[in-house]
Image (cartoon, grey):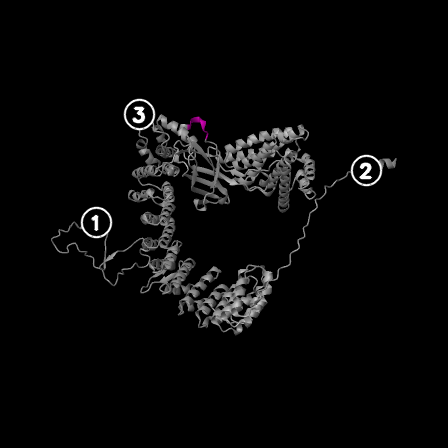
Amino acid sequence: MAALLKKRALAEYSYVIQEEPVPVKKLRLVQKAPLPEVHVNLQSATSSHEALLLLLKFESSLPIDGEAANGVVGELLDHYAREKEPVIRCKVISVLGQLSRLPGFNTEIVVDTMLVSCQAEKSHKVWSQLLHTLGTLGLCQSLNAGIRLQLVELARQHLSDPCHTVRSASLNMIGCLGSVDHKQSSGVAVDLQSLLADFTHDQDPRVRTSAFHAMLLFHERGIQLDIGIYQQACAALKDDFEDVRDKAIKLMWVLSHLYPESSVPIPDSSEDLRLIDDAFAKICNMVNDISVKVKVQAANVLGSLHLVSPKFLEQTLDKKLMSSLRRKKSAHERARDLYQSGEWSTGQKWADDAPREEVNPESISLMAVGSCGAFVHGLEDEFLEVRNATLDSLCELAAQSPVFAHMSQDSIIDMFNDEIDSVRLNAISSLKKISQHIAIRQDQLEIILGVLQDFSFETRETLRDMLGDMRLSTKDCLNDCITALLENLTRYPQDRLSVWKCARNLGRNHPPFTLTLAPVFLCIHPYFNTPEPNMDDPAYITILLLIFNAATDCPTLIPLFQDHIVRHYTYLRNSIPDLVPILKALEGATVCTDQDPVDSSKKMSTFLRQTVNRLSTLHVMDNSTAQQLLEITVRDLQRIAELDSSVSSSAECICLFLQSQLILTRLLSQMKSSFGGLTASDNILAPIDKILQLTTKLQTVYMGITTQELGLIRQTELKALTLQLRVTLSKGSLFDQFRASESYMQYLRQFSKFTESSDISTDTFTSRILSSMGAADANKLNTVRNLIQSAMPLVCISSFPLTCQIRKATVTVHEPPQLSEIPIKFAAGLTAAIPVDATVENIANIQDIKIQVRYPDQQLQVVTPRHTDFKKLGPLRHRLLTNVLISHALWSESCHVELTFVMESVTQGKQLRKQQDLVELCKPVKVLVSTKAAKRS
């Protein structure tokens, strides 16, 4: 009885815990291959010439492994010790310097050996190369502070060398390795900055350049420069050597940022100036330098001196004109003086209109002094590099000061007439950057609008973008702008889209002016009804875009609209919605704009997440239930992609994957109903091709897919390829069976490498196929057939996780327009150019983009645009402007030619498909083309 009770108690109160088997982690032991032995074979050289050839051959083989290069050091140093020619010794040292940059190279041993070997060196050329190489070796992280201190001391000892190259190399080494608390071996501290300042007065200009360069290296390394070297930099601005002046300008720019508020005494005066003001004036004076390099450098650094006083800044646009040592007044000043005096010259008295202002020749200089007229001289320079640099600095300073922006707009607008395209583009872009501070006057607008007649499309488009951001001062300015845009549209019809964008921006920025001009633009008469304009006229659309965009902030415009304008608004709102705003008064109750778009996007994201989450149990459902759920989910995802652009890419990506799963589910249902006897006669090849097309598009078009998600797509592709091989093995010819089997095994090897490198989890079907791959032989068709037959029952469908970072590669075609009624005519057998304007987004390599031309007789032509036809607009965003050449024989009537942007697929299973994989990036654009017979003479 006790035993029975004990057994019953154990049965009630004991339980068994079954632990899941822990997956075994596989370790891969990789044995490194032995490093190859590297030799220069300098022992075999019988002359210096042969040694030089061996060194050059070894130098051309670099880079090599740093650890393997350690064995060459002894051979190079031994040859250096016994070589008599200085040129060969220089080459040996140069090769050692290049080896020091290799990872794994033992730099410390080389430095120690070179310091010992250089004690007996006599050649100045070798010492120069030696110091340069030691400076390179000293920058390595593996060297300790003691060796670097020893290198700096070596460089300091050679500053007294009579050769300028040795002194320059020593100064460069001090700039690279020196520090503020440098001490000699005896413990005496050395001020390296004062030492460098002493060499700014060296007799050789190259040494002076190296001294200033070393100071700049100190600053780049974070060492605080002493303000006392400012005077040396100012004195160097008058140096005869242009490199010295260039380095002095850079040093003054650095000191201006370090000590902007420090006081600098004015010569022959008791007053002081701020250091940044004094440096600004001196750098401005260098804009008139004789060297182009110095002028460009001076003009470049002026723009970053934002703390300069306004009085110095305003003087840069003040240009004094002198004539016969007298100040020459402008025509406006002379007329004003005569009007104020009330006296006019009668011409009866000699010199009665002579200038009364006497000028002391000693107090006036004919040249611009300090900052006076610096930007004027820079903008009038004969070299385009100087003009571009001056425009950049002028724009940067004007963006910081509204007053200076107002003063500089005339100077910038004058550069619109420059003869160089790059300068004109720079001037247009500069004026656009300061648009928030200025307003365009009537006299300035005449110069600006003249650029719309420029032959360059890029210049015209940049100007229209600038006009859309500017503020116009009067309504006449707006009228002139619209008139010029309409003339531009007549002269260059291909600028249609850019002109419409400009009109849209002008309407948004100038609603009051548009209201006053609306009756003129719309041809509204108070008594007579005017005829309805043609809706296909691009000029009329330009006017409507101006009016509609102005009406968003000016509701009084809407009562002026006639009935046909309201109809045209509805048409334009549906055809070009990005250019036409929503007008509540014209939309009525059909549009609800009270909902916040941010809240709407959040709700759509929540709905998308809920839609995807209901597929979590898809893999355990039977085929009929899974098929119904997939059909509903695909329908919902298609609707989500249409409603919200923020989640459209993710919704489309998931939708395409689920479509492939839906087709696979139907195939599995078909296979079960036919008891596995599915053949090519059952129309299975078309659904399989559809699955392969979907997986190819998923891998090619969408960016941001994770490795696990890519694994799901690749596994779906494997299932489709397995079904395709099964059909081929059942009904194909013997040659097709062997070829398909070999291609399938090759794909399996690539897929196995992908799964191992990416560490993705595979389903039972994929694991069964990959595990049996080693036992299968492509030449044994029965083995492959049995492998597929045993694995097919394991095929199951899977869901796709939600990824919000997916982006889709898209191409938006602006030109040519869709279904144009005006045909492009060309002689049969010759060529015609179709201008193409498109925006390309989310494509990493733009060279993969191609344009496919499909003729009415279904002939295909693939055109690859040139790299220069792409213009970068932003990250992963480009604009394509190119011409597509077409040619064909004679047609009886006009037909449409389809242009489509395509991209070659990146999938590894494309070798198993017979057709070429080109994934479409946009819908085809139909262009009406007409051929005519060639004229015979």
Q: CA distance from mark 1 to mark 2?
A: 119 Å
Q: Residues within 10 Å of mark 3 (few under 14, many from 20)?
A: few
Q: Is residue 898 magenta?
A: no
By secondary structure, the bulk of the magenta-drawn segment is best described as helix
N-terminal of the pair, mark 1 or mark 3, is 1
N-terminal of the pair, mark 1 or mark 2, is 2
**Disc 2 secondary structure class:** helix
Q: CA distance from mark 1 to mark 3?
A: 52 Å
Q: Confirm or deny contact between disc 3 and disc 2 (CB under 8 A).
A: no
In this image, 112 relative to 547: left or right? right
Residue 186 visible, this angle: no
Up/down of 391 relative to 885, above or below: below
**Disc 3 secondary structure class:** loop
In this image, 288 relative to 703: left or right? left
What residue span does the magenta drawing correspond to?
587-592
Closer to viewer: mark 1 or mark 2:
1
The residue carrying mark 1 is 336
Closer to viewer: mark 1 or mark 3:
3
The residue carrying mark 2 is 10
Name, please, the residue furthest toward the right: 1
Quadrant of image for the N terminus: top right
Residue type pointed to by label 2: Leu
Q: Residues within 10 Å of mark 2 (few under 14, many from 20)?
A: few
Q: Residue at x 50, y 43 (%)?
A: 848
N-terminal of the pair, mark 3 or mark 2, is 2
In this image, 806 relative to 31: left or right? left
Q: Confirm or deny contact between disc 1 and disc 2 (CB under 8 A).
A: no
